[in-house]
Amino acid sequence: MSLAVQIRQHGGPEELQLVDLAVGEPGPGEIRIRHHAIGLNFIDVYHRTGLYPLAMPAGIGMEGAGVVEAVGAGVTHLQPGDRAAYASQPPGSYCEVRVMPARCVCKLPDAISFETGAAMMLKGLTAQYLLKKTLPVQGLQSGDYVLFHAAAGGVGLIACQWAKALGLQLIATAGSDAKCRLALENGAAHAINYNTEDFAARVKEITGGQGVKVVYDSVGKDTWDKSLDCLRPFGLMASFGNASGPVPPFAPGMLGAKGSLYVTRQTLFTHMATRASTQAMADDLFAVVQSGQVKIHIAQRYALRDVQQAHRDLEARKTTGSTILTL
Ligand SMILES: NC(=O)c1ccc[n+]([C@@H]2O[C@H](COP(=O)([O-])OP(=O)(O)OC[C@H]3O[C@@H](n4cnc5c(N)ncnc54)[C@H](OP(=O)(O)O)[C@@H]3O)[C@@H](O)[C@H]2O)c1
């Protein structure tokens, strides 16, 4: 049996209920993992509210770290006793122990703790594919400017550090002066409080009127329009989230008028479609974390039974960096 968090219908944090679930043996391509820590992500809020609908009853959570207890037929990259961590579908990581697909689960290097593993897989692999694989047609060169919204959050603080390691000048936005300071301490070249400043005007000022080559935008509805005004000609608008609500429909002709812009909507699990691509991305993340160039900031810890409060705080923009649930 496992203590687990389930929802029976979409709704507020109060829908997150603790239940006891029977856990069986892993089938072909599956493992059973006992969690030591669980990662909290904004996508968990979309799953809970129904912005991304789930069949009911549903588990929540897509990130965790622990010890592999059993492996099913055909699983060759993991064995019982291995330390492991993952970002994976389907949702269901808010639990003590689970059976799940093995494909996205990676062996965790001994030098990386379970808590760090749980705090970094979904967010760090996202920062990896954004900065390494979601590029403008001209590519990104050392010294280039990029704009990264919500830069003091989980994905954001990793991206600030990784961008600096790549030689990029990351312009951060965040919702308070304290969050802006945090982004700067973590490698952002500039930081803009988008609740008190006109971020498009500030970006133009910082870049000498040129604009940035890429905008990485996970805020969505509230930042979309102005973000397009931050791009230089042929720049890339990389949308990857909707913390403020989904981006409304737009007319493609407007992209021409603003400088022949490119738009993409990226999602992590397209990049993790194969075991080989998942492992390559994870190896890159493990290397940059072990080198010390990217530090994983676990700024909030909640017991699994306090998951409702964790969701309230994440949605109320009270968190910074990564949040984990402890067992
Ligand atoms: N597509 C993908 O592959 C992928 C993968 C991972 C994450 N994501 C997206 O990336 C974003 C960051 O994820 P995360 O888990 O690291 O979360 P997070 O950044 O720690 O938290 C979300 C942040 O968004 C900002 N925000 C702006 N408007 C908001 C609003 N109306 N309500 C709540 N927050 C708002 C807040 O920062 P400020 O107070 O500074 O504004 C908040 O702290 C999320 O949108 C998530 O869905 C996408």
Image (cartoon, rainbow, N blue to C red):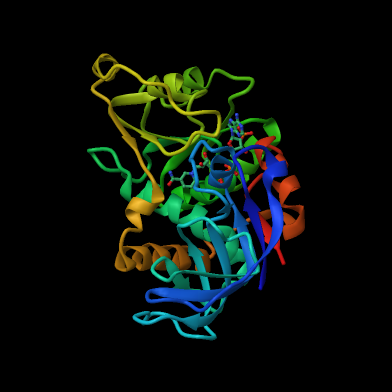
Q: Is residue 183 above or below residue 300?
A: above
Which percent across, then down, holds residue 24? 54, 76
Give the residue at x 32% y 25%.
232
For the image, the number of numbered tags is 0
Which corner quadrant of the figure contains ligand 1? top right
Quadrant where the N terminus lies?
bottom right
Q: Is residue 326 above or below residue 135?
A: below
Q: Closer to the camera, 31 or 125? A: 31
**Direction from residue 180 to residue 217 in the image, left or right:** left
Q: Closer to the camera, 103 or 256? A: 103
**Direction from residue 326 to residue 270 in the image, left or right:** left
User: Residue 269: in sight, yes or no?
Assistant: yes
Q: In this view, does 29 lie above or below 269?
A: below
**Direction from residue 128 to residue 135 in the image, left or right:** left
Which percent across, then down, holds residue 227? 43, 24
Q: In this view, does 206 lie above or below 77?
A: above
Give the residue at x 64% y 64%.
95
Q: Closer to the camera, 231 or 217? A: 217
Give the residue at x 72% y 57%.
18
Which percent across, then down, holds residue 279? 37, 68
Quadrant where the C terminus lies?
bottom right
Which percent across, then down, holds residue 86? 49, 65
User: Residue 303: in sight, yes or no?
Assistant: no
Give the residue at x 42% y 26%.
207
